Image (spheres, grey):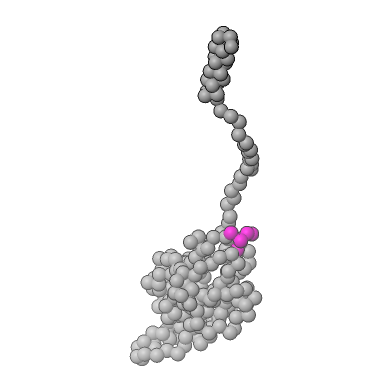
Amino acid sequence: MNSKLIKASLAGLAAIGLATAGSTFAAFSDFGNINGSQAGAGILKLNLAAGPGTATTMDFAKLYPGQSKQQFVWLASEDISSATPHANLALTIHNLSDTGAACATSLGKASADPGCVVDPTTNAISGTPSANSAGTGNGHLSQALTTYVEVFKNATSATCSAALGTWTMGTGQSLLNTAAGDLADPTQGAVGAGHKTVIKDPSTGLPLDMKAGDGVCVGVSTYWDNNHVGTPALKAAQDLLDNSAQGDSMKFDMHFDLTQV
């Protein structure tokens, strides 16, 4: 073979080898896109039966010794989706005010209230009702009443409504000491210092775990005990308190907090 031709062929192979060592061969590939990724914020909403954030006002009418009145409100945790976080419920009772009726309401009231004066000859009444020892006004009703606040696990608002009149006090989680004057007693954590009382599951003793659609029934009962017991002096003091509360009126607010766990 011609030596020039052999040398040219070898040079060509060397060039091909160099080209191969400095490059890569093609391989299969594919691609795809995920567009429009989203995130949203859910809501934690407490439904107080009458509308968002506002419950039906509780009205215990006019009470007298030996009488009790009951009121219920149904609360539910709700959301438009099933992704509602679990939450705990707490109650704070605050803004208690006790307004005294005029001394002239009755001779019984005027005789019992130290701020009132009764003329021993004419029975003419004068003076102004005295401030109560709880510092909530010049009325004495909140000191005379025993206030029960109890919570029951409940499935529906209809069940809560049906409970009215059938509730046996002491069967739910009590949020007060349930003693005369408990609502006015500043040592009551749920009242005096605006302390939050976490509502518990009576079956476990742990904070009630509420999720979307869960509800509780809150029962409030006021009872005016006229079965006074104790020493004659104690009975006499209780009788004076009852009489001094004639015509008085009290108001208080119930604040509910639903907090994500």
Give the main secondary structure, helix, strand or loop, of the magenta stretch: loop
Residue 117 appears in the figure? no
Q: Quadrant of residue 230?
A: bottom left
Q: Residue at x 58, y 9 (%)?
A: 2
Q: Residue at x 59, y 48 (%)?
A: 39
Q: Can you say whether 42 is above or below 37 in the image?
A: below
**Which image quadrant: the N terminus?**
top right
Q: Give the extent of the magenta segment.
A: 78-83
Report x, y in % for residue 56. Answer: 61, 69
**Viewer-closest of 111 and 154:** 154
Q: Quadrant of residue 43?
A: bottom right
Report x, y in % for residue 253. Answer: 51, 67
Q: Residue at x 46, y 83 (%)?
A: 242
Q: Residue at x 46, y 75 (%)?
A: 204
Report x, y in % for residue 15. Answer: 55, 17
Q: Can you say whether 244 is above or below 46 in the image?
A: below
Left or right: residue 69 compared with residue 233? right
Left or right: residue 39 compared with residue 110? right
